[in-house]
Image: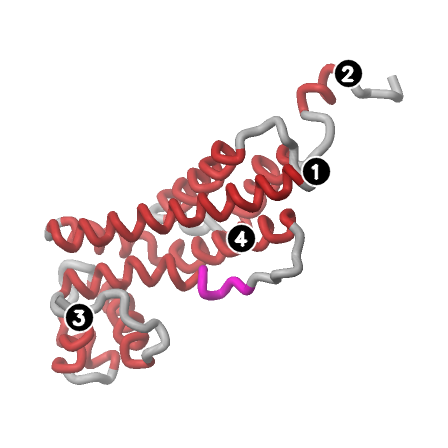
Amino acid sequence: MSDTSGSSSDPKRARILEAAMAVCERRGVHAARMEEVAALARVSKGTLYRFFASKEDLFLATLIDSYEQGLRAVVEDPKAGPRERLVAAIDGLGKVLTTVAPRAAVLYQAWGVVAGEPAYESRLHDFLRDFHRDRQAEFVHTIVEGQRAGVFRSDVSAEVVAGGIGALLSGFIYRAAFDPIAASGEALRDCFDVMILDPLRAGPGPAARQTGEVDEDG
């Protein structure tokens, strides 16, 4: 079995992944042929099979790479405070969605092909589980740090907030399969602002403002 998670910096591997996606978008996942992918990527069939042992292996790599592309585009500032880091991390998820959304329908088809082979399906599930767990752990760490610094409200569970962030991303990715225009990175960020960042900001909670408990102006 080939190294599906091979170096993303290898230009041949990157061309193969792009070619595979282009062929699938043009012909459909089930009709895609490895020979056509190799030709479009300008590599020999031998080179193609050196990177990917089968069509399922190739499709698994396209699924994984679609998530990783957005993360590679994020550059963290080690001097930034917790709120700035949380915003940057959310922007990274927006980049993931921007990468995935236009190709979501094809990626779901590829998922169906991968799911037909238990070994590949297991590897996909392992990747996605670790991807979401790692993102959640990062969010929890940043939120807790912000709570201790007084930047974020301390009366909310960091784990629950982080879980909500993951749920928003998953929901937008699902919608992208049939409504990619509405499921944009900008729309996702707007939802994060309204549903996550604004309620998380330290200060009087929404309920207190609505009941007038802290309304000093009467």
User: Is residue 134 in the magenta section?
Assistant: no
Q: Which residue is mark 3?
A: 52
The first of marks 2 and 4 along the sequence is 4
What label does residue 150 carry, if any?
Answer: 1
Q: Quadrant of residue 152?
A: top right
Q: Quadrant of residue 53?
A: bottom left
Q: Amino acid at mark 2?
A: Glu
Q: Amino acid at mark 1?
A: Gly
- Residue 198 visible (yes or no): no
Q: Nearer the viewer, residue 82 or 94?
A: 82
Which segment is the magenta one?
A: 71-75
- Secondary structure of the residue carrying tag 1 is loop
Work out which quarter of the rendered image holds the C terminus and state it: top right
The first of marks 1 and 2 along the sequence is 1
Q: Amino acid at mark 4?
A: Ala
The first of marks 2 and 3 along the sequence is 3
Q: Which residue is mark 4?
A: 89
From the image, state whether disc 1 or disc 4 is nearer to you: 1
Q: Which residue is mark 2?
A: 213
In the image, residue 175 lies at what x, y percent? 38, 43
Q: CA distance from mark 2 to mark 4?
A: 34 Å
Q: CA distance from mark 1 to mark 4?
A: 19 Å
